[in-house]
Amino acid sequence: MTSLPRVMAVLFLLFQTGPLVAQNGAPGATPSTHPEAVPNLDLTAAQKQTIYTSATNLNMKNEAPPDFQPIVGAVIPQDVKLEKMPKTIVELTPRLADFEIGLIANQVVIVDPKSRKVVEVIVGEKK
């Protein structure tokens, strides 16, 4: 026999996670309104600048579908090529080792390769 509190807990979890799948399941889907859906990398300004400089030196393609906006939580379309995180960045910030990187519209995106969700967008400093 199942207790009422256990049933309530299961129902609560079902209703909490159900909409996340529907909102973020398909490439090009709108970004999640739940900030917990992507990890917070908590990068310093200096780390962001180093990552931006390294990424722009990789000569990656700078293309994306015209209707795609590189924002945190957005799912990167399959036709956008991502690269492994550069070794120099991983040496400086080891927690980034499992992420991939891309360059879209002169913005560096850090992406979770499993979900293809953007977890960080870095814009270079204006000169």
Image (tube, rainbow, N blue to C red):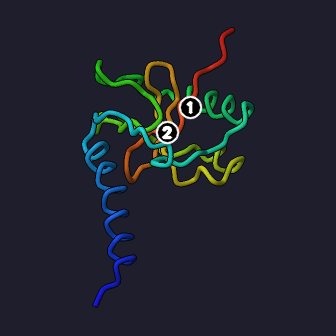
Instruction: Please name the residue that numbered disc 2 is placed on.
Output: 101
Looking at the image, residue 5 sits to the left or right of residue 98; the answer is left
Residue drawn at x 42%, y 38% as measured from the top left = 33
Q: Quadrant of residue 83?
A: top left
Residue at 50% x, 48% y: name it. Answer: 36
Above or below, 62 against 48 in this view is above
Residue 69, picture quadrant: top left
Question: Label 2 sits on what residue type?
Answer: Ile
Residue 12 located left or right of residue 71: left
Image quadrant occupied by the N terminus: bottom left
Query: SS class of the residue under badge 2?
Result: strand
Q: Position of residue 64 (x, y in %)?
A: 34, 24
Mark 2 surroundings: few (<14), some (14-19) or many (≥20) residues within 10 A: many
Tell me the residue that label 1 is attached to: 55
Whether label 1 touches label 2, CB < 8 Å = yes
Mark with earlier residue (1, 2) = 1
In this rendering, position of residue 86 left or right of residue 12 = right
Give SS at disc 1.
helix
Q: Please name the residue shown 34% across and 49% down the image.
A: 20
Q: Nearer the viewer, residue 94 or 38?
A: 38
In terms of depth relative to the viewer, which is nearer, 57 or 19?
A: 19
> As shown in the figure, which amino acid type bears the numbered disc 1?
Ala
